[in-house]
């Protein structure tokens, strides 16, 4: 594999950070444990992008350019969207898959 052993830098955008905070705040109204698990799941998922982020599937939608974003599922029903540019993976969004996330497109 050409990128085996390569370590990528991870950048969490302000948008993704705000979405994560919003989800955690909502969950905290029901359960602090659930909110903490959500944040931990996001951090763990994002951290795995350090090695082989190319393993993640493309987000496919006619409204976005072909092969622009990749997706990584975390938790029970959440997804982070990211792009790879050079040696950096940029996490652009953290969404609940039950929500309409068409606005991202």
Image (tube, grey):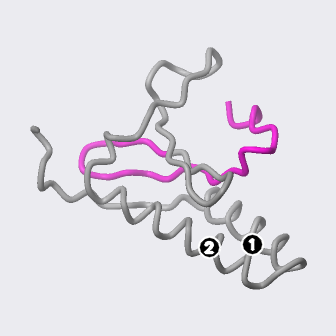
Mark 2 and mark 1 residues within 8 Å of each other at the beta carbon: yes
**Residue visible at 37% across and 51% down?**
89
Camera-side residue: 8 or 78?
78
N-term mark: 2 or 1: 1
Instruction: Tell me if residue 35 is in the magenta stretch.
Output: no
Between the residue at mark 2 and the residue at mark 1, the CA separation in whole angstroms equals 7 Å
Query: In x, y percent, where is residue 34?
Result: 73, 76
Outermost front residue: 76
Q: Residue at x 85, y 70 (%)?
A: 26
Bounds of the magenta span?
82-105
Q: Quadrant of the C terminus?
A: top right
State the SS at label 2.
helix
Please give the residue where the numbered disc 1 appears in the rendered image: 24
Q: Residue 51's x, y, as percent?
A: 26, 56
Q: Within the image, what quadrant is residue 61 found in?
A: top right
Regarding mark 1 in the picture, which secondary structure is present there?
A: helix
Of all residues shown, which one is farthest toward the right? Answer: 29
71 left or right of 38 in image: left
Image point (75%, 32%), residue name: 102
Is residue 94 shown in magenta? yes
Q: What mark, if any, has residue 39 been given in the picture? A: 2
Left or right: residue 26 versus residue 19 is: right
Residue 88 to residue 66: above or below: below
Kindly indicate the quadrant of the structure image that contains residue 42: bottom right
Q: Is residue 96 above or below residue 39?
A: above
């Amino acid at each position: 594999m050409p990128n085996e052993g390569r370590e990528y830098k991870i950048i969490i955008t302000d948008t993704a950070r705000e979405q994560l905070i919003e989800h955690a705040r909502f969950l905290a109204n029901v359960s602090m444990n659930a909110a903490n698990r959500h944040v931990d799941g996001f951090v763990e998922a994002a951290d795995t992008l350090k090695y082989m982020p190319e393993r993640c599937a493309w987000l496919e939608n006619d409204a976005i350019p072909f092969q622009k974003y990749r997706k990584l599922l975390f938790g029970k029903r959440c997804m982070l969207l990211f792009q790879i540019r050079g040696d950096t993976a940029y996490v652009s969004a953290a969404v609940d898959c039950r929500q309409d996330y068409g606005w991202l497109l």
